[in-house]
């Protein structure tokens, strides 16, 4: 670049030299078509989804979501993921430079007056976090659906023959008679328009214009299922084990619910005796003394025979226990389990062993093993933490699908 | 557009007449959103990473709430690149053109900028775009998980370069030895050896290095790229790509107050002296100027932060007023923010600007603790120390390939945020593929964090 005299008037030759110093480029059209920010934001959201999936079991273990999931919502606070950097620890006192007419010793804000959210830029250090958060309100039902997809549960088919016809009422056609609630506004307006077109001095609406939706009953094929959740509540079952069982039950139900139009859930708890409970109490129950699983199997059998005809209901049983069964109960348990399994579409056994990595053989697992060997549709899984629950669900439902495919 | 081009050319002529010098500047009018993304990514085309998505959404929310508006993004180089928002008013864009010329003049003079350009050339934007493209092909070849793991680690260590060393170091053990034996000149040692009587400080007699690294290595990105036990070629490239971009960002970071102040000084002066601008356009442009270059506290209000535009602008005005333009240009060439604030923010100006130091305690109270000029200077500079990051160095590479990092808590004055540091170690261990540990000290004594590859 040549040095020039400080003259403001420019000549044509100087102008040419200027053009190389400052240029305006033509606009590039792709700027409007592609957003890098949006792409990376979507990737962030994908990671959030993944993180939610890992934690969601914990989220669910808190409430009574099993029997009445419809209409329920949970609020899930989604924190933006933080890409960690090395950073100094928060100091006891944060120093910063400020500006304005204040004197040394002035108190700008008294103690105990922390603002609700410490916004960005408020502190000298510029703490970005906390100024921005998302909260999602999710329908529990949607969430379960979404989770089932995440779990890639296979489609289950009900046992053939176990379907019943169920009356159902549907809308069909229209007519001049009906109740106000079923007024067909669109058709009514159409009628009125046609009439007004041919009349001189027409009134806006007359009774003859009104059209109503008509109803028709029809038979609908439907399949029903009953699920028994059986829980060992003897002394040896700890809170952690219950939580695992509860989580498992929830997702087992979610898997079944997708397949059956109507599903009934029964809760059975047992120690040496067995009782049926409503959901709310089911997970609170603590028994004392020993364990006799046969009591629960007998109670289930009774309930099945009394309320659920084999021709109308698919039956499932999921049993959660720590695997300790009384020695004297071995023979009764084997007998009752065998009798019961003939009536079941599937029997899932979940052994809760939190904190253990090696699993010794237990009585219960041995019994179930015998059943599986004899060709009964059943499965058994040992879980140590929530992560294993997913594995267990996959295993059970994968098994079901294989059975049907065979 | 044509009026803007016309004004830009005449403002540039005026700038030249006033003694401003710069490389060619390519202006481009772009949509608002592109502008915002460029500000978020730091470069017009850069590697993809989810953390940019988070910053993007923050900006988007802030913009929709009307909190922030971006007028200009400028990239020094040869040619310099500057982006203007196509929906901004003509007066605003005229102001921005003048402002950008101020930045271009600054980058042309300042030693840090000149040094960085001498090391990496003037086409950093094209190179960054090419690197982004290579990372896209790595994504296709190795899958999202793997590429993201490398970017997680590399971008987390973004600020951990050694700005006193050169960009293109020899890699591997050769680089360590070169550093130890001075084949690879350390600028500080070079200057040291030029001092009278220091010539004899020879290090070549020392025995062959046995430990890696010989001295604590603060250039973590380089160290990982050249010593990572099982790093693949493309993974090394990612670390070096992030490193090169950090070298590019460093002068902008280290001279923010000077640079923004200089550009503001010049845009104000250029507009004032541009008698060819219509009166109403001048008034609107100066209005935009006062919105950007204003003290955060006015009248009886107080602010707990300082507007760097306003501080730099006020300082340059005073320097030009008291010492003259030539002295100002010399300061512009020689200093970074540390020297600038420590040497040229004097008591009188600090008093006039009402600067103070405050302390915010954990109980929520905020107190003004000092108006002393030294305290004010250090409070302004504290967040700018060491590229804004804690001083973490590679201390030892063991024979089994495990890596030990050390935090220099003495110079930082306090310990690390342990939870975050642990996560950074996790990122690093994943690509280092051997155990990684970090030694630090905090008020509860010495701490060792460690992470293993899973």
Image (cartoon, helix red, strand yellow):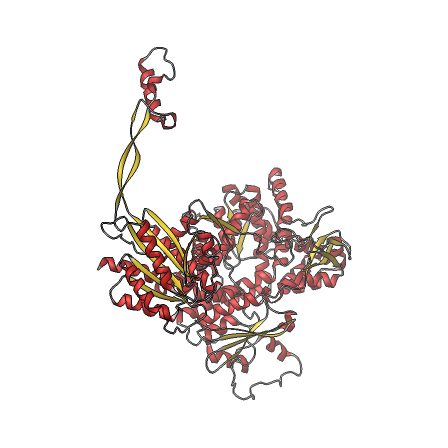
Percent across and percent down for residue A250 are: 40, 55
Give the side of residue A123 with respect to residue B429, left or right: right
Q: Is residue A114 visible from the viewing direction of this image? A: yes
Up the image or down, A61 lies above or below B389; here it is above
- Residue at x 26% of width, y 59% of height: A342
The residue positioned 31% from the left and 66% from the top of the image is: A334
Q: Quadrant of residue A215?
A: top left
Q: x, y percentage for residue A290?
A: 43, 67
Q: Nearer the viewer, residue B320 or A274?
A: A274
Left or right of A95, for residue B281: left
Residue lying farthest to the top in this orientation: A200
How many numbered discs, if any?
A: 0
From what the image shows, is residue A115 above or below residue A362?
Answer: above
Q: Nearer the viewer, residue A246 or B201?
A: A246
Examine the rendered structure and indicate whether residue B116 appears above or below residue B9.
Answer: below
Location of the C terminus of chain B by quadrant is: bottom left
Question: Which x, y percent locates residue A299?
Answer: 36, 57
Q: Residue B41's x, y, as percent?
A: 49, 56
B90 relative position to A322: left or right:
right
Name the residue rendered at 29%, 38% in the picture. Answer: A167
Q: Is residue A149 visible?
A: no
Q: Nearer the viewer, residue A219 or A364?
A: A364
């Amino acid at each position: 670049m040549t040095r020039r005299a400080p003259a403001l008037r420019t000549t044509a030759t100087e102008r040419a030299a200027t053009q190389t110093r400052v240029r305006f480029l033509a606009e590039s059209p792709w700027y409007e078509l592609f957003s890098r920010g949006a792409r990376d934001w979507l990737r962030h959201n994908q990671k959030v989804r993944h993180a939610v999936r890992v934690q969601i079991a914990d989220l669910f273990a808190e409430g009574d979501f099993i029997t009445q999931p419809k209409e329920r919502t949970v609020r899930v606070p989604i924190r933006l993921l933080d890409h960690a950097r090395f950073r100094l620890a928060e100091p006891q006192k944060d120093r910063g430079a400020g500006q304005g007419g204040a004197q040394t010793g002035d108190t700008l804000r008294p103690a105990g007056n922390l603002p609700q959210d410490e916004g960005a830029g408020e502190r000298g250090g510029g703490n970005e976090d906390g100024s921005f958060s998302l909260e999602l309100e999710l329908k529990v039902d949607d969430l379960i659906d979404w989770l089932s997809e995440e779990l890639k549960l296979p489609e289950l088919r009900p046992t053939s023959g176990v379907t019943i016809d169920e009356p159902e009422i549907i809308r069909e056609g229209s007519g001049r008679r009906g109740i106000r609630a079923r007024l067909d506004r669109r058709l009514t307006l159409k009628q009125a328009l046609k009439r007004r077109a041919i009349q001189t001095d027409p009134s806006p609406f007359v009774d003859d214009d009104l059209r109503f939706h008509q109803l028709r009953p029809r038979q609908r094929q439907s399949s029903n299922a009953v699920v028994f959740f059986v829980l060992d509540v003897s002394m040896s079952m700890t809170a952690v084990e219950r939580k695992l069982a509860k989580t498992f039950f929830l997702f087992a139900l979610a898997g079944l619910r997708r397949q059956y139009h109507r599903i009934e859930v029964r809760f059975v708890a047992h120690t040496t005796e067995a009782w049926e409970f409503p959901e709310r109490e089911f997970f609170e129950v603590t028994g004392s003394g020993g364990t006799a699983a046969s009591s629960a199997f007998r109670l289930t059998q009774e309930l099945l025979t009394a309320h659920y005809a084999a021709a109308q209901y698919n039956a499932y049983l999921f049993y959660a226990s720590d695997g300790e069964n009384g020695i004297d109960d071995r023979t009764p348990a084997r007998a009752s389990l065998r009798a019961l399994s003939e009536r079941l579409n599937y029997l899932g056994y979940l052994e809760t062993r939190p904190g253990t990595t090696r699993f010794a053989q237990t009585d219960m697992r041995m019994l179930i093993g015998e059943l599986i060997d004899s060709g009964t549709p059943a499965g058994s899984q040992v879980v140590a933490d929530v992560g294993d629950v997913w594995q267990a669900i996959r295993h059970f439902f994968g098994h079901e699908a294989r059975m049907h495919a065979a | 557009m044509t009026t803007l081009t016309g004004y830009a050319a005449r403002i540039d002529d005026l700038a030249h007449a006033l003694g401003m010098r710069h490389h060619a500047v390519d202006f481009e009018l772009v949509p608002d959103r592109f502008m915002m993304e460029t500000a978020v990514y730091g470069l017009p085309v850069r590697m993809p990473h989810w953390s940019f998505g988070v910053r993007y959404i923050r900006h988007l929310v802030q913009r929709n709430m009307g909190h922030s508006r971006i007028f200009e993004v400028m990239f020094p180089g040869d040619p310099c690149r500057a982006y203007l928002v196509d929906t901004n008013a003509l007066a605003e864009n005229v102001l921005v053109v003048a402002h950008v010329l101020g930045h271009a003049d600054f980058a042309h003079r300042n030693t840090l900028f000149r040094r960085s350009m001498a090391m990496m050339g003037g086409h950093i934007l094209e190179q960054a775009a090419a690197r982004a493209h290579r990372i896209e092909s790595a994504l296709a070849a190795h899958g999202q998980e793997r590429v993201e793991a490398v970017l997680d680690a590399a971008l987390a260590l973004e600020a951990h370069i050694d700005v006193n060393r050169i960009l293109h170091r020899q890699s591997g053990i050769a680089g360590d030895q070169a550093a130890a034996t001075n084949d690879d000149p350390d600028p500080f040692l070079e200057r040291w050896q030029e001092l009278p009587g220091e010539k004899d400080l020879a290090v070549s007699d020392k025995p062959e290095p046995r430990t890696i690294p010989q001295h604590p290595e603060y250039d973590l990105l380089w160290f990982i790229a050249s010593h990572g036990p099982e790093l693949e070629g493309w993974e090394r490239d990612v670390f070096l790509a992030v490193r090169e971009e950090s070298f590019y960002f460093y002068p902008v970071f280290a001279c923010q107050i000077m640079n923004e102040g200089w550009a503001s000084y010049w845009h104000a002066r250029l507009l004032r002296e541009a008698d060819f601008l219509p009166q109403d356009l001048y008034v609107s442009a100066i209005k935009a100027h006062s919105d950007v270059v204003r003290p955060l506290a006015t009248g009886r209000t107080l602010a707990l932060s300082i507007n760097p535009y306003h501080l730099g602008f006020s300082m340059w005005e005073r320097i030009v007023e008291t010492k003259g333009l030539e002295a100002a240009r010399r300061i512009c060439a020689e200093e970074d923010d540390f020297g600038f604030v420590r040497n040229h923010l004097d008591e009188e100006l600090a008093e006039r600007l009402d600067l103070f130091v405050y302390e915010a305690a954990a109980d929520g109270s905020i107190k003004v603790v000092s108006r002393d000029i030294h305290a004010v200077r250090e409070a302004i500079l504290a967040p700018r120390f060491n590229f804004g990051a804690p001083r973490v160095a590679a201390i030892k590479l063991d024979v089994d390939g495990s890596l030990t990092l050390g935090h220099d808590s003495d110079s930082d004055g306090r310990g690390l945020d342990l939870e975050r540091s642990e996560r950074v170690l996790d990122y690093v261990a994943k690509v280092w593929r051997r155990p990684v540990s970090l030694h630090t000290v905090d008020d509860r004594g010495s701490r060792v964090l460690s992470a293993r590859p899973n």
